[in-house]
Amino acid sequence: MRTTSRLVVFLAVLGVLGCTLPFGGDDPPGPTPPTNAAPTEVDRLGQQTEKTNVYIGDCYNRVRDSIERSTTRYREFIQRTGPDVQDVPRNGPPRLDPRVDTSLCRRAHTRAAAMAPSMPELERTGEAYATQVERLVPILRELDPYYQRGSFRDDGLARGREIHARLMPAIRSYEEAERAFSAELDVVERRRMELRLAELETDPLRRGAFLVERTMFRGRQLLDQGQALILTFDRTGAIPASDREAYVSAVTVFEQEIERIQGYRPAQGEHLPEGFATYVRETEDMLRGQLRFMRYVRDNPHPVLRLLQRAFQSTVDGFNHAVVAYNRVRFRG
């Protein structure tokens, strides 16, 4: 049974997916292809990206962080009351009301599902995610005034226990739906980035842009890898030695890549992307967060879940700092 909230904050997703694929240059356009020409992979991926951007920009990025903050606060609160909310606490939890409009999320999912191309798994998991948002948010909103007004002191927490019994299954269902939906969104993003990196890597005058994209991509992969470690520990009570070693190795490689971009000097004739220097400065926070979590994983074969999550949050914070800088980078050509 999953009892911890997912901590990854995917602030990068909208910015990454919102970038255009710079496959064009300054050369005059070639001949117009025949209208019945089969779409290329780039064409298909462009359509898929437009569709996922609706899911992400109009729903996912608008609701996820707020919901996760509320559920995390509640879980921290019930650690003081017992797993079944037995003991009346001195104080209630911080605000639990996620400031989101569930109707906007539903409309976004309806619009995205109607867009070409058909993506059955994305549409199915997106529908499930919107449904779970609509189920969870009203329960949180019902619970929030109960604690904020101190009503739990009047009824000895009786209503709190009743709402708790509905809330915890709703949280777990939401988290399962979020993981499945996020995985489908990641399929498009990974392939888009693979094409982007392959195209940049062959151009010596865009090496700086390549390093920006690759460090951001690798940082995101490490977040996923770290999250998988937490989920494994949550389910089984242990992190296999092979998983710990793989993570330590991946962070070591990532440190080398960060050092490479931090020491990069452009080739003659290369114009670095606007915002390159600011992004490079922020990669240090991203690296330090990963190193902190890696050392906790490496040095604690029997970790404490709370401390594991706290160390992982440092990777999230560092990554998000880099994301802010990344979203301001202006790539050339």
Image (spheres, helix red, strand yellow):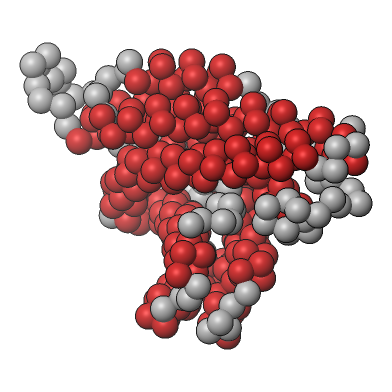
| Placement of 144 over or under 206, stated as above or below | above
- Seen in the picture, residue 287 relative to 191 is either above or below; the reply is below
Dividing the picture into quadrants, the one containing residue 181 is top left
Q: Nearer the viewer, residue 171 or 246?
A: 171
Total marks placed: 0
- Tell which of 128 and 226 is nearer to you: 128
Seen at 55% across and 38% down, the residue is: 170
Q: Is residue 19 above or below residue 9?
A: above
Q: Position of residue 176 (x, y in %)?
A: 45, 45
Residue 236, percent across and down? 45, 70
Question: What's the residue at 73%, 51% (across, down)?
Answer: 85
Q: Is residue 103 above or below residue 120?
A: above
Residue 84 position in % (x across, y down): 68, 52
Residue drawn at the location 89% of the way across and 48% of the way down: 91
Identify which residue, 85 or 287, lies in the foreground: 85
User: Which corner quadrant holds the C terminus?
Assistant: top left
Residue shown at 55% from the left, 52% from the top? 6
With 294 as the anchor, is 51 left or right in this view? Answer: left
Quarter assignment of residue 250: bottom left
Residue 76 makes an appearance in the image:
no
Residue 285 x/y as whole percent: 65, 63
55 relative position to 164: left or right: left
Residue 87 seen from this side: yes
